[in-house]
C-alpha cells in the first residue's frame, strides 16, 4: 500500500476518527486506526466495539491500494510535529513507513485483518435531516444527559431519538433537568421509531456533531433494534443503543403555570453569571425574585460572600421566589443566540420551571428548596 496525503487534512480526519478509538484497557488492536486505501479514496476506521466510525480522507493520491493499521497516538504525534505539507504512507506486511521531505518514521506493521469490521450504510429505511439543523438540535439537549457516574435511573446517559414522518425529536435528561427539541426531517422507506425508545450514547452524538461542518449537507439516520447508523457525506458512525428504558418524559413535563415571563437570552445569561460568582461548592444556588417589572438574583456563599443583581423585565404578576443551580441555566442559555426571546413558565416555588423557545424547544429545570440569601 502506498498513498500520499495532505498532512493537515489527514490530521483533521485522524483527530475526528480518534474519538472512536478504544481506551487502553481493551484489545490492543483497537488502539489503532485502520486505513483502507482503494483506487480513488482512503477511508479511516476506528472502533471500541460500542461505537464505530468510517471517515473518508480527501485530497489523497493513491499509488498502490491496500490496508494498514496506524498506532493512533504515535501517528497523531507525527502529523502534528512534521512541517511538510504532504506525507507519504507506505506499508508492507511487516512495517509502515511515513515520509515527508526531510523526515522518515518507521513503525512495525500489524495485521489489518485482525481489526473488527466497521459497518457501512446500506439501509433502505432512514430519515434525512439537514446537518445545520441537526447540529443545533444536538447542542440544545446534550448537556442535559446524565454522566455514567451520576446516572440515577434508566437509559439517561444518551439522547432519546424519536423519528416519525416529517419530524425528529431529541430528548435528554439527568433527572434534575430535561431538554426537548423538535426539527424537520424526511422519512424514507417508511422509517419510524414509533413504539420504540432508541437512546443514542452521548459519545456517538458528540462524534456526529464534530462531523456536521456543512449546514446544508444531508444526514441520514437509521435505527435498528439494537443499534443506530448515522451517515454524513464523508463519515459513517455506527453505535449500539443505550440499554435500559428512557423515562416517560411526557408525564413529568409541566402543563400548568401561574406566570409566563418573556426574557431576552443575552441580558438574562449575563445576570445569572454575575450572581453565580458568589456561589461555592456548598451553596450552588441562585435565588430568583420575579416581581413587578424587575428580576432580582441573589446568591450567598458560606465563605465567598454574597451577590445581588437586578435587571428590568416585563412582568406584572404576583411575586415568585424560586432557586436554581445556576449551572443548569447557564448550560442552556449559552448555546442560544443572545437576542432570542425565551418564555419562562413558573407555577410556584417548589415546581419545575419551563424555559421555552417557541415552538420547538423546551427546557425543564427542577428548583432547589428555597432559602433566604439575606
Image (cartoon, rainbow, N blue to C red):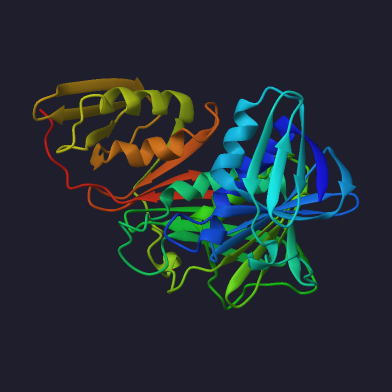
**Residue 333 position within the rendered picture, expressed as x and y whole percent measured from the top left:** 45, 35
The quarter of the rendered structure image containing the C terminus is top left
**Residue 58 position within the rendered picture, expressed as x and y whole percent measured from the top left:** 81, 41
Residue at point 34%, 26% (across, down): 273
Residue at point 27%, 28% (across, down): 276
Q: Classify residue 308 by image quadrant.
A: top left
Q: Is residue 150 left or right of residue 95?
A: left
- The answer to whether 167 is drawn above or below residue 177 in the figure is below
In-front residue for pair 297/105: 105
- The answer to whether 194 is drawn above or below residue 111 in the figure is below
Q: What count of labels does the image hold?
A: 0
Residue at point 14%, 24% (across, down): 304
In-front residue for pair 50/184: 50
Q: Is residue 357 left or right of residue 313?
A: right
Kindly tell me whether residue 285 is visible in this rendering.
yes
Kindly tell me whether residue 360 is visible in this rendering.
no
In-front residue for pair 306/58: 58
**Residue 77 position within the rendered picture, expressed as x and y whole percent measured from the top left:** 57, 34
Q: Is residue 160 left or right of residue 291?
A: right
**Residue 282 position within the rendered picture, expressed as x and y whole percent measured from the top left:** 14, 38
Amino acid at each position: 500500500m502506498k498513498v500520499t496525503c495532505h498532512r493537515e487534512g489527514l490530521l483533521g480526519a485522524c483527530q475526528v476518527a480518534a474519538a472512536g478509538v478504544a481506551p487502553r484497557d481493551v484489545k490492543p488492536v483497537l488502539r489503532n486506526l485502520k486505513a483502507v486505501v482503494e483506487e480513488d479514496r482512503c477511508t479511516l476506521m476506528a472502533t471500541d466495539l460500542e461505537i464505530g466510525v468510517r471517515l473518508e480522507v480527501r485530497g489523497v493520491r493513491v499509488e498502490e491500494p491496500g490496508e494498514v493499521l496506524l498506532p493512533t497516538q504515535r501517528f497523531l504525534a507525527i502529523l502534528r510535529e512534521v512541517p511538510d505539507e504532504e506525507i507519504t504512507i507506505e506499508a508492507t506486511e511487516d512495517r509502515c513507513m511515513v515520509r515527508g521531505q526531510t523526515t522518515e518514521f518507521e513503525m512495525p506493521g500489524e495485521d489489518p485483518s485482525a481489526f473488527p469490521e466497521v459497518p457501512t450504510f446500506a439501509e433502505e429505511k432512514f430519515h434525512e435531516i439537514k446537518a445545520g439543523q441537526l447540529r443545533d438540535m444536538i447542542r440544545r439537549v446534550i448537556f442535559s444527559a446524565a454522566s455514567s457516574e451520576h446516572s440515577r435511573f434508566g437509559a439517561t446517559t444518551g439522547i432519546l431519538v424519536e423519528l416519525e414522518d416529517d419530524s425528529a425529536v431529541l430528548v435528554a435528561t439527568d433527572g434534575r433537568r430535561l431538554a426537548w427539541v423538535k426539527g424537520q426531517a424526511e422519512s424514507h422507506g417508511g422509517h419510524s421509531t414509533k413504539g420504540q425508545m432508541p437512546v443514542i450514547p452521548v459519545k456517538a452524538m458528540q462524534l456526529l456533531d464534530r462531523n456536521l461542518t456543512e449546514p446544508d449537507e444531508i444526514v441520514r439516520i437509521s435505527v435498528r433494534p439494537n443499534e443506530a447508523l448515522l451517515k454524513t457525506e464523508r463519515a459513517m458512525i455506527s453505535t449500539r443503543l443505550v440499554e435500559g428504558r428512557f423515562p416517560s418524559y411526557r408525564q413529568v413535563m409541566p402543563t400548568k403555570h401561574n406566570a409566563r415571563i418573556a426574557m431576552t437570552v443575552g441580558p438574562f445569561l449575563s445576570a445569572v453569571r454575575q450572581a453565580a460568582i458568589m456561589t461555592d461548592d456548598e451553596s450552588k444556588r441562585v435565588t430568583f425574585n420575579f416581581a413587578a417589572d424587575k428580576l432580582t438574583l441573589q446568591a450567598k456563599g458560606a465563605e465567598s460572600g454574597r451577590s445581588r443583581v437586578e435587571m428590568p423585565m416585563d412582568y406584572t404578576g404576583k411575586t415568585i421566589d424560586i432557586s436554581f443551580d445556576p449551572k443548569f441555566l447557564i448550560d442552556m442559555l449559552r448555546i442560544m443566540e443572545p437576542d432570542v426571546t425565551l418564555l419562562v413558565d413558573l407555577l410556584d416555588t417548589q415546581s419545575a420551571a419551563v424555559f421555552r423557545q417557541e415552538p420547538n424547544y423546551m427546557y425543564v429545570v427542577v428548583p432547589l428548596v428555597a432559602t433566604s440569601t439575606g
